[in-house]
Image: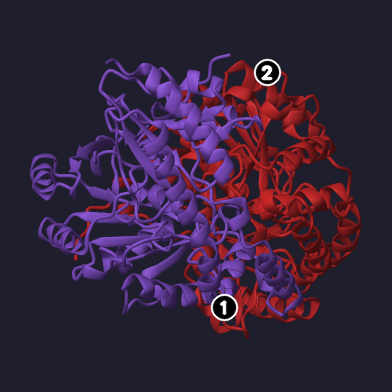
Chain colours: A red, B purple
Amino acid sequence: MEFRFSDRIKDLTANAIREIFKLVAQPDIISFAGGLPANEGLPLKQVKEIADELLSSDKALKILQYGATEGYPPLLESGLEYIKRAGIYNQGFENIIAISGGQQGIDLMCKAFLNKGDCVLVEEPTYLAVLHILKTYEAVPIGVKSGDEGLDLADLEEKIKKHNPKMLYLVPTFSNPTGKTIEAGKRKAIAELCAKYKLVLLEDDPYCELRYDGERVPSIKSFDKEGYVLYNISFSKTISPGLRTALIVGHKDIIRKLTLGKQATDVHTSTLSQAIVDTYLRKGYMDPHLEKVIPLYKAKKDAMLAKIEEYFPSQIRYTKPEGGLFIWVELPSYINTKEIFIEAVQQKVAYVSGESFFPEGDVFNTLRLNFSNATLEQIDTGMKGLGDLLKNKIKE
Amino acid sequence: MEFRFSDRIKDLTANAIREIFKLVAQPDIISFAGGLPANEGLPLKQVKEIADELLSSDKALKILQYGATEGYPPLLESGLEYIKRAGIYNQGFENIIAISGGQQGIDLMCKAFLNKGDCVLVEEPTYLAVLHILKTYEAVPIGVKSGDEGLDLADLEEKIKKHNPKMLYLVPTFSNPTGKTIEAGKRKAIAELCAKYKLVLLEDDPYCELRYDGERVPSIKSFDKEGYVLYNISFSKTISPGLRTALIVGHKDIIRKLTLGKQATDVHTSTLSQAIVDTYLRKGYMDPHLEKVIPLYKAKKDAMLAKIEEYFPSQIRYTKPEGGLFIWVELPSYINTKEIFIEAVQQKVAYVSGESFFPEGDVFNTLRLNFSNATLEQIDTGMKGLGDLLKNKIKE
């Protein structure tokens, strides 16, 4: 049976991580592959209490009926308050919409800006879903270099001039996949570069609340005087990914186009999800929840770093993130992490091989480790297995 | 401030209905414009009971955590059972995905099949959101004639040959906007035509359970031997639109592409919404709910038809639907319903003028009336106001 699929989808393969999810669904595999919050860090009791209150209240009808594409008005209001934590002030209802998870923010931005063949700049490596989404728009990702000091601004400016990109995409805080954070001075410079070249930046900031060490850095959006920065803030890592709720904040003309794009896809985000997030914010549940979750995640992160020291070969390099969910490992260039993945799974441990995070898919000696979803015991066992495998691959 | 928006969105204006929603938000306007289920027909008590049970159960963690793009497995299972009501059997898990409302089904089908410039056949008039979505894919809708006997099969076949369309889109049961239903013999012929020309049909069936008179007609999908028909079934009109949950069923190769497309937009549908719909189906709440809602809607539909007879000028034609939410009115050709809309709103009554439902937007003497969301008293008052306005426009 042959169907005449669109060019954008006919050769599209699954997002690597979503496929790994299925592979590692066997209960005896220790997975460092996903980007899942810890089960024990999900605010079950609070969500249950809130859902119960909402559906018993006079808001219940509004929650079950159709809503506005822009979002559930109380959530837009509490969202405008919430983003002040990221240093973002003076935004109104015309500057915000509620979306169905942070990833929809990327999709809607692409829908609003990209024609076939358009170029988008991304940090190298970058969040793999953005590369997957760009394929569905037949757009071209171009990697901007990023070293130990983070994003290379000279390379960024050069590539802006060379490629005339429509958009820049960054996860500046506890990056997925590296865990690295761009420091404040560089954030200001990025905002200024965007203004100088009239380049739209999508600042994707799902991990900003998950800081275990160091001080909070203001968002790039907080340095944006001109309106070229769109701020995408998900509640998947701080409340619940299953609720699929996020907010996107920025210039009203862009928000208007995102709204039109969303109107043409899912009409609006589940109002029950939106109302749960709104109530959670209003009740002040975020900070107590973070106070509970952060020590949990910090312990896991520190354990994983210690196990890298203990079990991994000395010939590797790795990041030491101050927050987020991921550690990034670089191996000697002759080790292909995609090839040895199957051996790792035989050792009952899974990671994401790094090539999926590169625009060209051409870097094979890196891997991403997630520490949030495993127990400390699993981290010990899994890292030992992985360390043994990697040591076996080292040529003396 | 000038942004370089994509071709698909730079000139896109809002979906007419979503904009009317805002216009008629004033409480003193009687709106026949929307397509909202009646507030009194929303199963508040059941949803509250189900949410409470789910979030107290051992399913709660699965509901708050990330889920599979394909959907919440229990819902896929109960969904496969549910579609048997539409005469659809022998489908497996590879034939179904859960989506974020029926409209996402249209969007994902377009994403999977349409390149810029591709042609899609639609019944004339058709659901206006499909025309809006087609603009975001820079695709070309072509209208297929539809008379008192429903879709014109000769015109359909001619246009298939002439335009080589990628897709056919139909709302065959209680059509939006006309309320008309395609009879069983013609459904079989449509399925056969699709197979003959290898044409993919998206059968959008959100209203099928809302039948007030006559006998249920099997879905077109039930006549599909070859796998060219995709069946899109929303729970917005039977449970709650705010939950944004629907299912799409069809050939596994197409379902796979829809899954890849969905992976790149919202990852998965709110699991809480999916689990609520699943439990609602499993508890057998659908039929008792329909038994409660159908007499309510039937009374409103019959009242609106009676008021057309009583208050509207005799020079009009209108449909007498056996179900659904809409009545379609054709006026003498010199009356422009878009122009007189503002006068209607001044009379405190709103409808949707018909031009938005035509691919060319060139038919100005029709309007769509919704009867489900107004009270019987509002129907009387609103239809009198609208009737007076229309009578004033009649030339003797």
Classify A245 as above or below A188. Answer: below
Q: Position of residue B67 (x, y in %)?
A: 59, 67
Q: Residues within 10 Å of mark 2 (few under 14, many from 20)?
A: some
* Quadrant of the frame with the N terminus of chain A: bottom left
Q: Position of residue A71 (x, y in %)?
A: 65, 41
Residue plotted at (24% across, 49% down):
B168
Query: Is A161 displayed left or right of B250 in the figure?
Result: right
Can you tell which quarter of the image residue B252 is in? bottom left
Between residue B82 and residue A127, name the one nearer to us: B82
Query: Is A366 displayed left or right of B122 in the figure?
Result: right
Q: Residues within 10 Å of mark 1 (few under 14, many from 20)?
A: few
Mark 1: which amino acid? Ala
Residue plotted at (30% across, 30% down):
B314
Classify B348 as above or below B146. Answer: above
Q: How many marks?
A: 2
Mark number, residue A25: 1
- Answer yes or no: is residue A360 visible: no
* Quadrant of the frame with the C terminus of chain A: bottom right
Please give the chain letter of the residue carrying mark 2: A
Residue lying at the far bottom in this picture: please name it: A28
Q: Secondary structure at mark 2?
A: loop
Mark 2: which amino acid? Glu
Residue lying at the far front in this picture: please name it: B310
Residue ID for mark 2: A226
Residue plotted at (79% across, 31% down):
A88
